[in-house]
Amino acid sequence: MNNKGQLTIEYIILCSILLITLVLTINTITNEVEKNTILSAAQIGAQNGINKNGYATYYNDTFNNYNQHHPQLLTPTTIKIINITLDEKNKTIFIQTTVTTKTTLDTQEKNIMGSRINYYIRKSITDTFGKNPTNIYYDPAKSENYIIKTQPVIWK
């Protein structure tokens, strides 16, 4: 029996296995890097939204609306981020933000502030990936491989 060529076949099989493993690993790492970038952009956006709420500076029409219906929103409010999480379903990522404040706010005021936080999260993600906004509310935001939606902010 002739053993010529045996080493070459084993070498080709080994190289094939290594190549397949390398491709799968790179794909996984690339997806994780994109998710980490989304989460980092979400944290920056949430902080920007919180800062806008904290400064209590608004456009004239918003100011007039708040002056009539939500005067509490015209005073600076300290909000702290407790947690931001990602939940992936297929190619859609849902971002859930949990915040807290010592200021007494009613449900509608919390919804207004939460909407502003979510707006800046979506805006930050869209800007980070250099994508065109889908509408004036950046809803949904998009990355290279995912559609990103925000859940209503949880207040604790």
Image (spheres, rainbow, N blue to C red):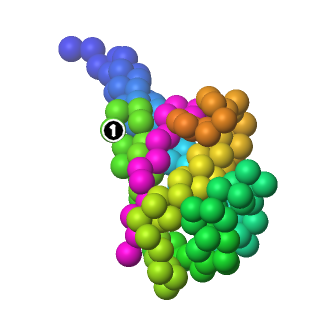
Q: Which stretch appears magenta?
A: 142-156
Pick the residue in front: 18 or 10. Answer: 18
Residue 154 covered by magenta stretch: yes
Category of crowding for the residue at label 1, using alpha-carbon neighbours closer than 10 angstroms: few (below 14), some (14–19), many (at least 20): few
Q: Residue 144 placed where, x, y %?
A: 58, 33
**Residue 26, above or below 73:** above
Q: Residue at x 75, y 65 (%)?
A: 57
Q: Residue furthest bottom?
A: 102
Location of the N terminus by quadrant is top left
Q: Residue furthest front?
A: 68
Indicate left or right for 60 with 111 as reference. Answer: right
- The answer to whether residue 44 shows anywhere in this view is no
Location of the C terminus by quadrant is bottom left
Image-quadrant location for residue 76: bottom right
According to the image, label 1 marks what residue? 89
**Residue 39, above or below 80:** above
Image-quadrant location for residue 11: top left
Q: Residue 4 placed where, x, y %?
A: 35, 17
Indicate left or right for 41 with 8 as reference. Answer: right
Q: Residue at x 35, y 26 (%)?
A: 13
Indicate left or right for 99 with 13 as reference. Answer: right
Q: Residue furthest right?
A: 60
Image-quadrant location for residue 93: top left
Residue 17 covered by magenta stretch: no
Q: Residue 32 placed where, x, y %?
A: 48, 48
- The answer to whether residue 94 shows anywhere in this view is yes
Q: Secondary structure at mark 1?
A: strand
